[in-house]
């Protein structure tokens, strides 16, 4: 290899390295913090109550006071990894998988928001990854199947195979999109832990560790989502949910602090 060839290879690799190693943007303002013992995987909200999610348990908290009003505890053998949930009507719809076991299997677990009673389970069986997200938008279900490099991953598929899938009411796949390469590089070696559609028509996602929120949109053509903006968060990744009553309020968790955090996300330009 000539000196010129080596220099060209270095310059070609440099932007990707710089992007991956760049610090996260300054965190968005925090308007509220609530303690929740279950806040280890994610949070969901119906505007009046918070639902803090752990692998096999859920806590329901009143936003106005921080009081816990209901809780649910499942058997760990049945619920090894419940990741994120969203409120749809009177139901809390949750993404679950057998992570870190392989082969990867997934299910949708549904709870009554009033009592937190488990009302049904929809087995998705083997899929294109581990189900980490279930969201509702425009009359469709939107699921993320995560893939990992190392623990919880399957041979031949790493984080680059993480995929967003649009599903019908019976949770049957209709279409799917790959994530932007720049976003995947920031999530590596883990994957997408949280995703929620916003009223502004953009998709907002988080990884597993970085205090960042990725605003994306569906492409006009092709099979890969487009990154619009990277926004700083006060919390390190994990599952998220938009508040339906307070504009631009996003709920996330402080995993190590066992707290649910409300951030005011600035409008994307």
Image (spheres, rainbow, N blue to C red):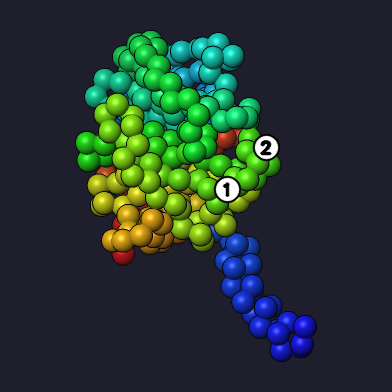
- The CA span between labels 2 and 1 is 11 Å
Q: Quadrant of residue 134?
A: top left
Q: Is residue 221 above or below residue 111?
A: below
| Residue closer to the observer: 201 or 178 | 178
Query: Which labelled disc corresponds to residue 159?
Result: 1
Whether residue 122 is visible here, answered yes or no, is yes
| Residue closer to the observer: 255 or 32 | 255
Residue sitting at x 46%, y 20%: 58
Q: Is residue 233 above or below residue 19?
A: above
Label 1 sits on a secondary structure element that is helix
Residue sitting at x 59%, y 14%: 77
Query: Which labelled disc corresponds to residue 151?
Result: 2
Relative to 4, 33 lies left or right = left
Could you tell me how many numbered marks the image carries? Answer: 2
Q: Quadrant of residue 185?
A: bottom right
Looking at the rendered image, the quarter that the N terminus falls into is bottom right
CB under 8 Å between discs 2 and 1: no
Label 2 sits on a secondary structure element that is loop
Residue sitting at x 58%, y 15%: 76
State the residue lying farthest toward the left. 139
Image location of residue 238, percent across then percent down: 51, 39
| Residue closer to the observer: 128 or 55 | 128
Q: Is residue 233 above or below residue 47?
A: below
Q: Choose the circle earlier in sequence order: 2 or 1.
A: 2
Q: Quadrant of residue 166?
A: top left
């Amino acid at each position: 290899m000539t000196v010129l060839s080596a220099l060209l290879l270095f310059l070609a690799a440099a932007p990707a390295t710089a992007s991956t190693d760049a610090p996260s943007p300054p965190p968005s303002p925090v308007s509220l913090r609530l303690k929740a013992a279950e806040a280890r995987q994610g949070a969901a909200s119906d505007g009046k109550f918070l639902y803090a999610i752990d692998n096999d348990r859920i806590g329901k908290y009143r936003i106005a006071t921080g009081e816990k009003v209901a809780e649910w505890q499942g058997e760990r053998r049945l619920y090894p990894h419940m990741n994120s949930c969203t409120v749809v009507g009177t139901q809390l719809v949750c993404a679950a998988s057998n992570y870190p076991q392989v082969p990867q299997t997934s299910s949708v677990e549904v709870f009554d928001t009033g009592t937190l009673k488990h009302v049904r389970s929809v087995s998705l069986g083997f899929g294109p990854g581990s189900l980490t997200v279930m969201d509702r938008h425009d009359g469709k279900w939107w699921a993320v199947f995560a893939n990992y490099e190392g623990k919880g991953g399957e041979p031949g598929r790493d984080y680059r195979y993480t995929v967003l899938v649009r599903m019908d009411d019976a949770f049957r796949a209709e279409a799917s999109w790959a994530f932007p390469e720049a976003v995947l590089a920031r999530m590596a070696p883990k994957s997408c832990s949280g995703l929620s559609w916003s009223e502004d028509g953009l998709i907002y996602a988080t990884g597993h560790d970085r205090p960042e929120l990725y605003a994306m949109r569906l492409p006009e053509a092709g099979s890969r989502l487009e990154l619009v903006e990277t926004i700083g968060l006060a919390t390190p990744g994990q599952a998220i949910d938009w508040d339906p009553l307070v504009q631009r309020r996003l709920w996330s968790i402080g995993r190590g602090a066992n707290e649910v955090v409300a951030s005011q996300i600035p409008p994307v330009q």
